[in-house]
Image (cartoon, helix red, strand yellow):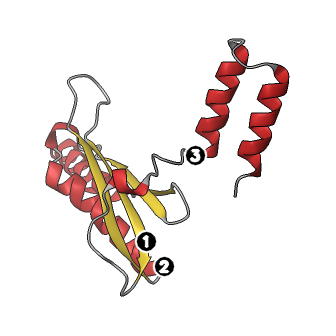
């Protein structure tokens, strides 16, 4: 019985050490996201999960010789069913040291007056498929979009 309890206690102590580190994903040239799922389940604390992603992002920024600028934090608490772990997604920008100017407003980073090329092409393709644009109009508009810098 003591052996079983010792093995169980050892497994509980070793399991967190085997946990996977948060993953850093590059979203654009200077924007990154750290994602992490805390597999401690109902025993996980939201502060621990959030702290882990922020520390990982800070270490990543230091390794690049830059400073991070937070954009957003998305946290999901533990769910009601199996394998619904608490998780956090931390989005941030890397800026050179000395150029940091506070948090970035996500709405300010997107230019609503100049939509991205992909969105424009999808909209154009949709209009072409619905028959609103002829083949010649579609080709002309597509060439204009692709010619933009």
Question: Picture coordinates of residue 128 (x, y %)?
Answer: 72, 19
Instruction: State which tag comes first along the sequence, 1 or 3.
Output: 1
Task: Tell me where residue 47 appears, x and y as whole percent.
Answer: 15, 55
The quarter of the image holding the C terminus is: bottom right
Q: Crowding at label 1, few (<14), some or many (≥20) Cα neighbours within 10 Å?
A: many
Judge whether residue 23 can be spotted in this image: no
Q: Nearer the viewer, residue 17 or 148?
A: 148
Element carrying mark 1: strand
Residue closest to the eye, 125 or 83: 125
Question: First in sequence: mark 3 or mark 2?
Answer: 2
Q: Are marks 1 and 3 in contact (CB under 8 Å)?
A: no
**Cα distance, mark 1 to mark 3?**
22 Å
Q: Look at the picture and state if 26 lies above or below 96.
A: above
- SS for callout 3: loop
User: Is 134 left or right of 107, judged from the image as shown?
Assistant: right
Which quadrant would residue 125 be assigned to in this image?
A: top right
Q: Name the secondary structure under disc 2.
A: loop
Residue 75 is left or right of residue 28, and the answer is left
x and y percentages locating residue 79 in the rendered image: 22, 29
C-alpha span from label 3 to label 2: 28 Å
| Cβ atoms under marks 1 and 2 closer than 8 Å | yes
Please give the residue where the numbered disc 3 appears in the rendered image: 116
| Occupied quadrant, residue 129 | top right
User: Pointer 1: what residue?
Assistant: 94
Q: Which mark is in front, 1 or 3? A: 3
Name the residue that disc number 2 marks: 64
Residue at 15% from the left image edge and 46% from the top image edge: 2
The residue at the far top in this view is: 131
Circle 2 packing at 10 Å, graded few (<14), some (14-19), many (20+), is few
Q: Is residue 148 above or below residue 54?
A: above
Name the residue: 29% across, 31% down.
Answer: 84
Q: Give the quadrant of residue 23.
A: bottom left
């Amino acid at each position: 019985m003591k052996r079983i309890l010792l093995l169980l206690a050892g497994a509980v102590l070793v399991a967190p050490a085997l946990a996977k580190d948060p993953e850093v994903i590059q979203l654009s040239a200077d924007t990154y996201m750290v994602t992490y799922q805390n597999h401690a389940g109902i025993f996980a604390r939201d502060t621990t999960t959030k702290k882990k992603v922020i520390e990982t992002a800070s270490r990543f920024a230091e390794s690049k010789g830059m400073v991070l600028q937070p954009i957003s934090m998305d946290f999901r608490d533990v769910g009601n069913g199996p394998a619904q772990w608490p998780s956090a997604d931390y989005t941030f920008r890397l800026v050179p040291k000395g150029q940091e100017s506070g948090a970035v407003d996500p709405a300010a980073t997107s230019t609503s007056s100049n939509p991205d090329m992909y969105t424009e092409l999808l909209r154009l393709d949709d209009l072409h498929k619905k028959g609103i644009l002829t083949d010649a109009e579609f080709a002309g508009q597509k060439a204009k979009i692709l010619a933009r810098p």
